[in-house]
Image (tube, rainbow, N blue to C red):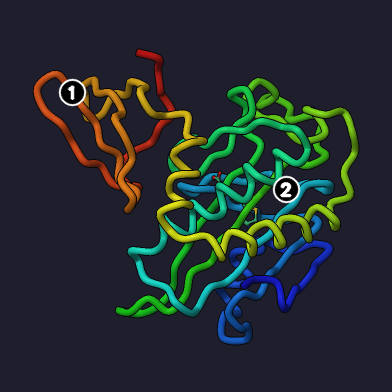
Amino acid sequence: MIGKKVVSFKSIDSTNTYLKENQENFVDGTVVVSKIQEKGRGRGDRVWESTNGNLYLSFILKENISYGRIFNILSRVCVSVINLLGKYEIEAKIKYPNDILVKNRKISGILIETYGNLVLEGIIVGIGINVNQIDFGTLNHKATSINNEINREIDVEAFQSEFVETYNKTLIVDDMSIFDEYLKHSMVLGKGIDYQGTNYKINTISPSGELLLTGEVETKRVSLNEISLEELYDE
Ligand code: BTN
């Protein structure tokens, strides 16, 4: 369960960085949120612009973890975001591995990081959800928010509690059902992808989070970190 302890900031560099640097002070499930992040981080060293009005939330997991469970944890977060957006009547899709899109525009991103020497000691899960931001500047064609979709301003603190509640509800659901939910909301199945100079079709995703690609001459299993799905196309 997450959120028994919640640490809130008005401003911080990054909720993920903060948890990583202070992990020894926090129990399993601690949630850290900030109204603003000065150095919000996305996957692949990208910047996550973090102005006031959106949700920037991280939590730390120390118990019951293994590298093999990371995709399951990621799936639980993705399914939570999808279900929560559903409550606001927003239909969202998961772009493998961890982007949440509404009509092809990104509304949420997830950054999972691990720490530990030799053995895994903890996992830090960071979630950014665009809640009230209206203008994304040059990214307007690629990003959206809840407010943009339903024309209503949302109370971010209440939304934060709703997220924690929704995530905790997934914890009583078994791993396979979560995986089925993840697949059901995935938008990448059947799409074409260029991988190492060859065209493949994304056939399915394995329960451990690998993509199964089918090409004209061979099939491939590709792990989470090996592929970027910037260029997806319809077959
Ligand atoms: C991505 O789509 O690239 C992942 C974005 C993750 C952003 C969240 S906001 C809260 C947490 N703190 C960070 O610095 N990043 C994550």
Q: Which mark is residue 215?
A: 1
- Image check: 230 left or right of 107? left
User: Which quadrant holds the C terminus?
Assistant: top left
- Residue visible at 82% across and 34% down in the picture: 147
Sequence-first tag of 2 and 1: 2
Is residue 64 left or right of 20 when viewed as pictured? left
Work out which residue is located at the far top of the displayed protein and give it: 235
217 lies above or below 67: above
Q: Which mark is residue 50?
A: 2
Tell me if the residue at label 2 has its CB under 8 Å from ligand 1: yes
Residue type of the residue flagged with mark 1: Gly
Against 138, is 23 above or below? below
Q: Residue at coordinates 62% horizontally, 51% vertically from top-left?
A: 80
| Disc marking residue 197 | none
Residue 184 sits above or below residue 81 on the image? above
Q: Residue at x 20, y 22 (%)?
A: 198
Indicate the quadrant where residue 8 lies: bottom right
Q: Position of residue 47 (x, y in %)?
A: 59, 46
Secondary element type, mark 2 = loop
Image spot of residue 205 (x, y percent): 33, 40
